[in-house]
Amino acid sequence: MFVREKYTRILQRLCSSRAACICVSQVRSRGLPDDHAGPIRIIDIEGVDANMCCGTHVSNLSHLQVIKLLGIEKGKKNKTNLIFLAGNRVLKYAEKSYSTERSLVSLLKTGPDEHVEAVEKLQKSVKLLQKTNLSLLRDVAILSAQNFKNDPQRGNFFSFHKKEGDNEFMNIIANEINTEETLVFLTVGEEKGAGLFLLAGPGGPVSDLGPRILELLQGKGAGKNGRFQGKANNLARRGEVEDLLRQHCKHHGSEEE
């Protein structure tokens, strides 16, 4: 680092360029606003040109050391933005890029020229695994519902939790079970953290119990047509919800008898 800075200072002294402030009357310029007042900075590169300063407030252009054009991007009003780095930022960018490259070589087990191809292969593998996982989750949802339906000792309440599930997972189970006769309570996500929930069943009980479930799970949600679902911030109280629903089903069953 010390050697680099030493030679940089030497090059700065050898670079023949300077900045000066000149009165407007002494400057021949294009595009200067009519209402401009005060002196104008001029950058003079010996043997090349002298131009108005564009905001580079340095006493000598050698302070910039290097300018690296990175690319372009679409700007506003049909204009194009030029992306670039200058001065010490170029050196820092090179150091950071090298460090990132070394890390990727270690992680991907390939050379820099093969990094893009390696990442593309990983992305394809992840997509395939996600697709397979989704298919398996659907199968688990259907089998869970069928096991309940085929149980001769089943009651009028069904509860199930699956950490890896999602909204589709819960809806598949609810669709498989006859919710006109059964109260279904489903949750997905962290067992003692945040997640999603679905309460399905007869319209009346679902509408009455939904808000109480929201309160217990510290969540947000809404319901209609026999379903009440939303986000839960505290699935650790899932057991309390199950007790509440079992008591309701037991009381409702006693009334029917």
Image: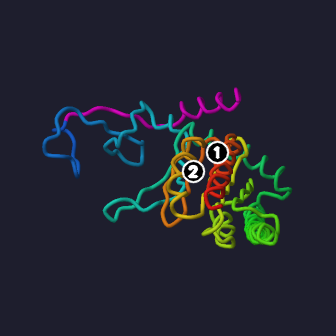
Q: First in sequence, mark 2 or 1: give its number.
A: 1
Residue drawn at (69%, 73%) of the image: 176
Crowding around mark 2 (Cα neighbors within 10 Å: few <14, some 14 to 19, many 20+) is: many
- State left or right for residue 168 relative to residue 149: left
Image mark count: 2
- Amino acid type of disc 2? Lys
Secondary structure beneath disc 1? Answer: loop
Q: Nearer the viewer, residue 74 or 215?
A: 215
Please say if the residues under marks 2 and 1 sit with CB atoms less than 8 Å apart: yes
Q: Is residue 134 above or below residue 95?
A: below
Which residue is tagged 1? 194
Identify the residue under disc 2.
231
Point out the stretch of residues depicted in magenta.
1-23
Identify the element where label 2 is drawn: strand
Question: Is 134 situated above or below 214?
Answer: below
- Magenta-drawn stretch contains 40: no
* Residue 125 position within the rendered picture, expressed as x and y whole percent measured from the top left: 78, 67
Residue 161 showing in the rendered view: yes
Name the residue: 54% across, 58% down: 206
Is residue 158 rendered to the left or right of residue 53?
right
**What residue type is disc 1 on?**
Ala
Mark 2–mark 1 Cα distance, whole angstroms, equals: 8 Å
Which of the 4 image quadrants contains residue 229? bottom right
Between residue 48 and residue 82, name the one nearer to us.
Answer: 82
Image quadrant occupied by the C terminus: bottom right
Quarter of image, res 130: bottom right
Residue 40 locus on image (x, y percent): 25, 36
Which residue is nearer to you in this view: 56 or 23? 56
